[in-house]
Image (cartoon, coloured by chain):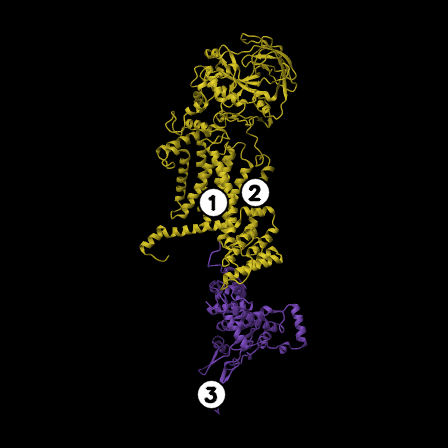
Amino acid sequence: MSSQLKLSTYGALATMATALSLLSVFQTTAWVVPVMGAVLLVAGSCALVRMSPLPSAFEPITAAVAVLLWVTALYAHDDAKAGIIPGTAAFRALGDVARTGFTEIHKLPTPAPPHDGLVMLTVVGVAAIALVVDLMTVTLRRAALAGLPLLALFTVCAATGHHGVKLLSFISSAVGYLWLLYADNRDKVTRWGAAIGSGSRARPASAWSTDPSSAPPPASLGRQVGAAAISLGLLVPVFIPGLHTGIGKRGGGGTGTGSGGGVVHTFNPIARIGAQLAASKATTVMRYTTTSSNPGYIRLTSLDQFDGTSFTERSLTAGANQAAGNNLPVQAPPGPTVQTTFDVASNFVVHWLPIETTAVGVSLGEPWRYDPGTSTIFSAAATTGGIHFDERSVPNEPSPAELAAAPKPQASLDADLTLPTITPPVRVLEREITKGAKSRFEAALDIQKYLTGPDFHYDTSVPADRSDQALYNFLFNNQRGFCQQFATAMAVLARLHGIPSRVAVGFTAGKKLPGTDTWDVTTKDAHAWPELWFQGYGWLAFEPTPRGDGQAVPPSYAVHLPGSGNGGKNNNSDVKSTLPHKGQGATKPHGKNKTGQTVGAAGQNNGGSGPSGSLLWVLLFLLAAAAIVPGLARGALRRRRWRIATDPARAPAVAWAELRDTVIDRGLTWDDRRSPRQIATALLYALEAAPKTCDSMLRLARYEEQSRYAAGPSKLQANLRYDVEIVRAAIDADRPRLKRAWSAILPRSTTLRTRASIGRTADRLQAMRRRFSPVAFLRARLGVTGT
Amino acid sequence: MTPRAKNPRSADMELKAVAGAGHRITDAIETVIEGKSEAIRLAVTVLLAEGHLLVEDVPGVGKTMLAKALARSIDCTVRRVQFTPDLLPSDITGVSVYNQNNRDFEFKPGAIFANIVVGDEINRASPKTQSALLECMEERQVTVDGVTYELEAPFMVIATQNPVEMEGTYPLPEAQRDRFTARIALGYPSPDAELSMLDSHGAGEPLEDLEPVSDDLEIAKIIQAVRTVHVADSVRTYAVDLVTATRNHPDLRLGASPRATLHLLRAGRAWAALEERDYVAPDDLQTLADAVLSHRLLLSAEAQIARRTTSMVVADILATVPVPARTARRPA
């Protein structure tokens, strides 16, 4: 029975090791606890059935029930009785979560966010695999076949995972499976009554031979065959033409930029901003001298096509009659003109001319042309490297009241309102943010205020998120990013509100050189900001990025004055408190509808560490604690023994037991079936011990022998603790430091003792099972004796 | 449980005396037989265990020499019987002859009436004659014409036999073999021992020079002391386990008898006493098991075909039966 329990454990471990391949399928580790918990539940419930009088057919049923309860507790807790027993409402809620999961499977690319639906489907799938593995390994005793479901799990992860499966996941899967095979075969061999392994691998209870060199041929042969098979499996694909996707090599797919193996470099202004901001060294890109005391942002171009992930530029078009010049076709607001002279660094080479957002003319002509759609001066032939030009601009600073009264935007700007499918939570969020706004302008200010609120953090180290869920993740999950994310979020939220918007790319005003009118703009000033259209006032810049270095300053009209408009009373806490929460969503009858749940989660998710994350930490902590428990337990036992050893009657027994554990901890053979003298002799022979050690060892053996077989108390006088220490020191003398540390952390004697006590418990359960089995009951009732 | 000596101090002294006497006898015999200390020690053990010894080996290795040396090293009555095919039971036990003067039958004691009886080439005598030893060896008495005569104490039969020469020999019956506490083989001496033997035996007759180092009274006392050696319950159980294993072993068609268990424990006590120990350890039984058990066992036909020997089977059993662990209290 204990061997079944052992195999069941190894099966569960193999499944968990293979399930680690899911790391490349999900973005975070929030799936770990639900999935691993399900695997443990399946193994545990199957083991319980085996120990009970129930027939094997109940194993899958019990496992299914256990997984159902687990899933209910995780995903329909509020609708279930006692939190785990599902009723009709809970089943309906689970059905909703599952449906969402199925929808997301088709929609979301990997790595996917660990949404409830996806994780629940993963839990069920992995639990099914764990069940099959358990049945094959323990019930059918075909551990090798259990590799098929494990392979299925691994293959699914490899096929769907981002860049396939990582090398570590492969190693863990392979090790898990091989361990399972090893345990199974070891168990089979021990059923014959022979021990397998020798020396440090031998089990002290069954190895009779004291000769450490007598490694049993089957074990060493098995190791060699295993090592050779794995090496072949890894090496052969490397040398076979056409098979270039072996472990250790990354597949070519995934980036989407390659074609035929070559890489086409496209200049993505947004990507460049991220790179420049993240660069450790700031490089001057341009200097300008201006008559304005408060120059605005310097724009390169603007991006007005939103593809669901980020804003991209549309193709710039300008005919020969649209050459740049002193009078750009823009509607200049009334006011004084500002003169600015630009000197662009020779190493800043782009095709867009850096100009102020309010530029009305430049001193350049052909080949620079002006695209009024994006307000971009560009050239297909010339670049900005080392260019020098003058620019004329008129500051555009309408009053908030004017902007609040701005009429509906003209229909020609519909392109700047176009959005792909936006997930419902984002729409709900937009409505909640802007629900108090009386005008488009107030709505814009509310959005800006929301994004610059305390929940959002400026962080240039955030990796680029190219998934469809980038916006969603930014708004609800991590709430960290730099100008790109903030500008995109504001532009999208503005479009949702009906305000034409786009993302401008360029630089902040830079730093004024002391004592001059010259401003220095470096790569660190690279910036993106949203521009919103207000009819009659044109494209106006807003600043939702909480940059914190004083470089990102909102324009005067966009400063949110307390009491002005509606923004003063619409702060973030109001938004959060009015967001629909789990169980009270108005849009769907069940509490766990996707919108309610995810937006609710966004409210709790400060800094990106959700409950699953903390559970993972707890799990890691428990694992770490479990790792040091054996060592601590061994130390406690040792101290207890030496306390007991002060009683002379019990001293020999505890000294001998301590010596036994000391020897076993260090991986040496100890055979309990032999006499103390024989054990001592074998050990001394193995150690090639010095005379002092021999004396101590033989004294201990003699003492033990007397206490076992002599009539009265021992007449020998010995310091047993000293003798044990002498032997321990002799064993440790030749062992590497690492091995010594390992035996202190994970003492073998403790694991063997734990294993033995589990075995005893299992045997007792087995005996109870026999006693209370239906057959025994009938026999007792009918008075049948014999077999 | 065997009663222990009430005064442990006197018990210690007795054990010292036992060990001392044992060493004296061993040393004395070793002056005659070189390099066979283990066999000699076993022989002394059998003497102290009140048993009988069967020395079985090829001719010329010193079987008779060992028997005679053991007999001579103790100052007691010794008789030697050369077992020949025409030897009669009455030659062993004795015979009643009619005394015309007394007009009565008078008992003439046979060779068995001595403290140590050396039976040379015991398997050359007919089974009828061999059977005459049965009662003497086990019950230490002789019954002739309905009259039972007690034998002297200590009483020990040391028999030798030759396993190679089968012509004209009568293998010892099982019952007879079972009465021997131990069977030992001397084996060929090592080259050094043989050289040293050439020196000593070439110059004179060491056996003739052998002076007794003990006497029957001391031996009787020592035997009493050996009886007081403690045998723990777990060790008794171990002895029973070993013997039981011979009865269930697939290679054997006859296992060891309960008498074998008794002999094993007695020999164990003597062995422990010779080591100056007042308790028997499982190691003692393991050391003695081959000598005490293997001559009583009969191999199955298959095992004989597989060229197994009873000593191999005993070694198997020793390897599989676990020694008794501590039972009284579980160690912490």
* Residue A472, image x, y percentages: 48, 25
Marks 1/3: CA distance?
88 Å
Q: Where in the figure is residue A173, as x and y percent of width and height?
A: 52, 40
Q: Which chain is purple?
A: B
Q: Which chain is yellow?
A: A
Residue B225 in view of the camera: yes
Q: Nearer the viewer, mark 2 or mark 1?
A: 1
Q: Are marks 2 and 3 on the same chain?
A: no
The residue pinned by badge 3 equals: B105
Q: Position of residue B70 (x, y in %)?
A: 58, 75
* Badge 2 amino acid: Ile
- The kind of residue tagged 1 is Thr
Callout 3 amino acid: Phe
Where is mark 2, residue-wise?
A230
User: Viewer-proximal residue, A264 or A753?
Assistant: A753
Query: A775 above or below A619?
Result: below
**Chain bearing mark 2:** A
Rendered image: mark on residue A9: 1
For the residue labelled by badge 3, is the local secondary structure a helix, a strand or a loop? strand
Element marked by disc 1: helix
